[in-house]
Image (cartoon, rainbow, N blue to C red):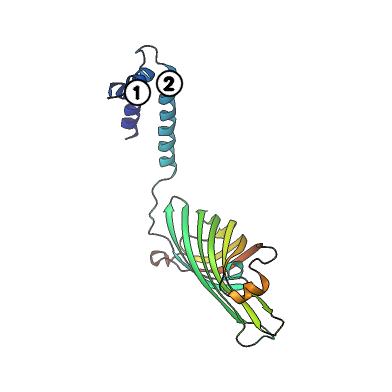
């Protein structure tokens, strides 16, 4: 297949010359049979490089059966997208070669000490991840989290105000340990997050929209278990 494409690319300038082009373009591409001009040489060289790179990439990454791997993980997060902690489920898909992506959703809930019973921390983190590797993966991602109670305050009249925010999380770098056949799961990563929406208007009126600082550096650590694929349950 690559030989046919290469043969076609060699004669591409001649095909362009013989096509219904205007005089200016034809004169630019026209070449002597025994002394090709500089443009034709550059076109031939660049197309040859592209074809050989594509062929090498195809040989370096043979097709992989994308059905034979464990997909579903449950894990607990310390800090991370849930704020303090969260319990999550992750579902991954293999894209090509060693590249995969996953989507995860989680839940955080706990009451605040010495606060009214209606004051609690509640989070719904959603995140997308892209990662590359076989067992040890480097990972990037982004997500949105609804967080209630991440920030609280009181007015001069004793009114208790609780933030109901939506936060954007960026994951510039992370490490992910996950085997194709399942088992122990671990992840550590850096984050940066910012509140993009505040649903409690009274909170904004009293304290303003932006916290200090507006962008928070953060980290996260995940421990969990990837359910084994049904064809790999006999593996250790």
Instruction: Name the residue located 32 percent from the left edge and 28 percent from the top edge.
Output: 8
Residue 141 picture quarter: bottom right
Q: Is residue 163 visible?
A: no
Residue 61 appears in the figure: yes
> 156 or 135, which lies in front?
156
Instruction: Return the residue found at the far bottom.
Output: 117
Q: Identify which residue, 131 or 171, lies in the foreground.
A: 171
* Mark identifier at residue 186: none
Q: Taking 228 as reference, is 30 left or right?
A: left
Lateral position of residue 13 relative to residue 149, left or right: left
Name the foreground residue: 117 vs 98: 117
Q: Is residue 119 above or below residue 83?
A: below
User: Element type at marker 2?
Assistant: helix
- The N terminus is located in which quarter? top left
Q: Position of residue 43 (x, y in %)?
A: 41, 25
Category of crowding for the residue at label 1, using alpha-carbon neighbours closer than 10 angstroms: few (below 14), some (14–19), many (at least 20):
many
Residue 44: x, y in percent?
40, 25
Q: Residues within 10 Å of mark 2 (few under 14, many from 20)?
A: some
User: Residue 13 shows which numbered tag?
Assistant: 1
Taking the spot 47% from the left edge, 61% from the top edge, the residue there is 102
Residue receiving disc 2: 39
Observer-nearest of 104 and 92: 104
From what the image shows, is residue 127 above or below residue 55?
below
Q: Is residue 35 left or right of residue 173?
A: left
């Amino acid at each position: 297949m690559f030989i046919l494409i290469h043969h076609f690319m060699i004669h591409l300038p001649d095909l362009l010359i013989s096509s219904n082009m205007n005089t200016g373009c034809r004169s630019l591409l026209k070449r002597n049979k025994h002394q090709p001009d500089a443009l034709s040489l550059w076109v031939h060289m660049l197309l040859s490089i592209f074809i050989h790179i594509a062929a090498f990439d195809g040989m370096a990454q043979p097709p992989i059966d994308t059905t034979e791997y464990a997909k579903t993980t449950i894990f607990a997060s310390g800090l991370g997208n849930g704020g303090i902690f969260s319990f999550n489920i992750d579902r991954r898909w293999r894209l090509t070669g060693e590249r995969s992506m996953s989507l995860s959703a989680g839940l955080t809930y706990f009451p605040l000490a010495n606060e009214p019973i209606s004051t609690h921390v509640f989070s719904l983190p959603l995140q997308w991840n892209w990662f590359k590797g076989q067992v040890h993966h480097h990972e990037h991602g982004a997500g949105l989290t609804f967080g209630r109670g991440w920030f609280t305050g009181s007015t001069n009249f004793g009114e208790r105000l609780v933030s109901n925010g939506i936060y954007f999380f960026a994951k510039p770098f992370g490490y992910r340990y996950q085997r194709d056949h399942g088992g122990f799961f671990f992840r550590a990563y850096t984050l940066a997050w910012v509140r993009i929406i505040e649903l409690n208007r009274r909170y904004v009126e009293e304290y303003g929209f932006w916290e200090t600082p507006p962008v928070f550096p953060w980290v996260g650590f995940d421990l969990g278990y990837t359910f084994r694929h049904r064809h790999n349950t006999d593996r250790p």
